[in-house]
């Protein structure tokens, strides 16, 4: 089930594109955003003729076509990997085109799903639920890479810029630095994983390979670039011990990818099912009067982390949780339940400072604090 422009795209699809925008480039590739005739926005990747790789090769060897082929090899490798590693957390390859360009025959352009860059600073300001979704995406991706059709795949470059977000899901986009071969060894001294902050020594198997080295490299990188920032803070208090254990176990490489994913899926289950809610004192709960088909347009206050900057918009498992949140905020005197849900199926609720101005709205329900 692919949610894209449909069948495999080729050169014909590129003849009628509109609104091309330059997105950016790395050492080898330039990326453009274009609209297909049907209106779907896609990304195009091609060798960057003014890029670092091609420029330094031409300076050294003076052979433009040969240098192009060398640079295009990376793009071709990435295209093959995108195709062989298909998964919800791998950027979708829609097709490719070989066409003559400038003085070079058969230049390669790949056509892929379009994503938004991963901006760490922005992610730190989003809700825990959205940040957890990214960590879960990453856990699922690493599990897939560890058990892929090609064997255990490691990403030598794991910085956030190798990934994009598509509708809140994390996807890996840059695979030209992916490696499938495991590291050969004669003893464990050959099996050192080196990172800026620390090193790990892994066992050398009887077959003469460093055990789980590819998967553990990915896992520690996931820890140092993503989990340590995104998983724990402002999480529901009852989930904190489990989240802390995930961060610690990946930071120490005491777990492999399978166990890490199992624990992330457990967090999802506890959150989605409402089991994470600590039994609040039913007896002392305040009374709220319910006004169906209505909303409070103003009377907002700010809370953190809110789904909306100017107001306090949070997701709740049920009405009881909404009441608990309102009771815990000194400013809160009312709340409005919307018909919108988050990716886990939780309802979005606006918390309000009062209800002096209630207006009709069929898609919302207002709850106001009963006096007394």
Image (cartoon, grey):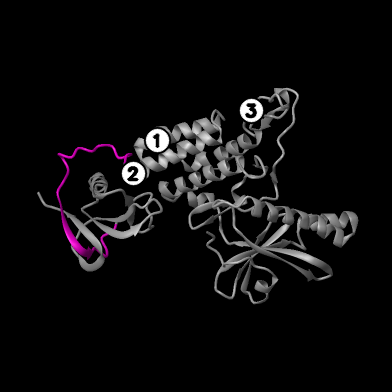
Q: In terms of image quadrants, where is residue 219?
A: top right
Q: Position of residue 137 (x, y in %)?
A: 51, 47
Label 2: few (<14), some (14–19) or many (≥20) C-alpha neighbours in 10 Å: few
Distance between mark 1 and mark 3 Cα atoms: 27 Å
Q: Position of residue 214 (x, y in %)?
A: 65, 37
Name above or below for residue 177 compared with residue 184: below
Q: Which residue is mark 3?
A: 200
First-in-chain label (1 vs 3): 3
Q: Position of residue 233 (x, y in %)?
A: 43, 40
| 343 relative position to 155: left or right | left
Q: Are marks 1 and 3 in contact (CB under 8 Å)?
A: no
Distance between mark 3 and mark 2 Cα atoms: 37 Å
Distance between mark 2 and mark 1 Cα atoms: 17 Å
Q: Is residue 287 magenta?
A: yes
Secondary structure category for the residue under label 3: strand
Label 1: few (<14), some (14–19) or many (≥20) C-alpha neighbours in 10 Å: some
First-in-chain label (2 vs 1): 1
Secondary structure category for the residue under label 2: loop
For residue 240, the mark is 1
Q: In terms of image quadrants, where is residue 198?
A: top right
Q: Which residues are magenta?
A: 275-300
Q: Which residue is mark 2?
A: 273
Q: Residue at x 63, y 36 (%)?
A: 217
Q: Position of residue 27 (x, y in %)?
A: 73, 54
Is residue 234 visible to the viewer in this orientation of the structure? no
Q: Is residue 345 magenta?
A: no
For residue 113, the mark is none
| 219 relative position to 105: left or right | left
Label 3: few (<14), some (14–19) or many (≥20) C-alpha neighbours in 10 Å: some
Q: Residue at x 33, y 44 (%)?
A: 273
Name above or below for residue 114 compared with residue 225: below
């Amino acid at each position: 089930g692919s949610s894209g422009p449909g069948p495999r795209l080729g050169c014909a699809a590129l003849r009628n594109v509109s609104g091309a925008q330059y997105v950016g480039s790395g050492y080898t590739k330039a990326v453009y955003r274009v609209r297909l005739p049907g209106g779907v926005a896609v990304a195009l990747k091609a060798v960057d003729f003014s890029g670092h790789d091609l420029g330094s090769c031409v300076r050294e060897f003076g052979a433009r076509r040969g240098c192009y082929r060398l640079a295009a090899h990376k793009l071709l490798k990435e295209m093959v990997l995108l195709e062989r590693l298909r998964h919800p957390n791998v950027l979708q390859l829609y097709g490719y085109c070989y066409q003559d360009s400038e003085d070079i025959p058969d230049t390669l352009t790949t056509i892929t799903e379009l994503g938004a860059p991963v901006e760490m600073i922005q992610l730190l300001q989003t809700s825990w639920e959205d940040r957890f979704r990214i960590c879960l995406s990453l856990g699922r991706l690493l599990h897939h890479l560890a058990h892929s059709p090609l064997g255990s795949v490691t990403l030598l470059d794991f910085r956030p810029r190798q990934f994009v977000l598509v509708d809140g899901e994390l996807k890996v986009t840059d695979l030209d630095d992916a490696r499938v071969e495991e590291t050969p060894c004669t003893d464990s001294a050959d099996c050192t994983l080196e990172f800026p902050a620390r090193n790990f020594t892994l066992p050398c198997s009887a077959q003469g390979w460093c055990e789980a080295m590819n998967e553990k490299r990915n896992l520690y990188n996931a820890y140092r670039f993503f989990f340590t920032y995104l998983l724990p803070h402002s999480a529901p208090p009852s989930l904190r011990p489990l989240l802390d254990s995930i961060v610690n176990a990946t930071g120490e490489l005491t777990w492999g990818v399978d166990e890490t994913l199992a624990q992330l899926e457990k967090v999802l289950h506890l959150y989605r099912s409402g089991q994470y809610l600590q039994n609040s004192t039913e007896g002392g709960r305040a009374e709220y009067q319910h006004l169906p088909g209505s909303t409070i347009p103003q009377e907002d206050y700010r809370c953190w982390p809110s789904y909306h900057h100017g107001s306090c918009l949070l997701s709740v498992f049920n009405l009881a949780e909404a009441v608990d949140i309102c009771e815990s905020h000194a400013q809160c005197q009312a709340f409005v339940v919307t018909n919108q849900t988050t990716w886990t199926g939780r309802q979005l609720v606006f918390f309000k400072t009062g209800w002096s101005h209630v207006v009709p709205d069929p898609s919302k329900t207002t709850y106001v604090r009963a006096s007394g």
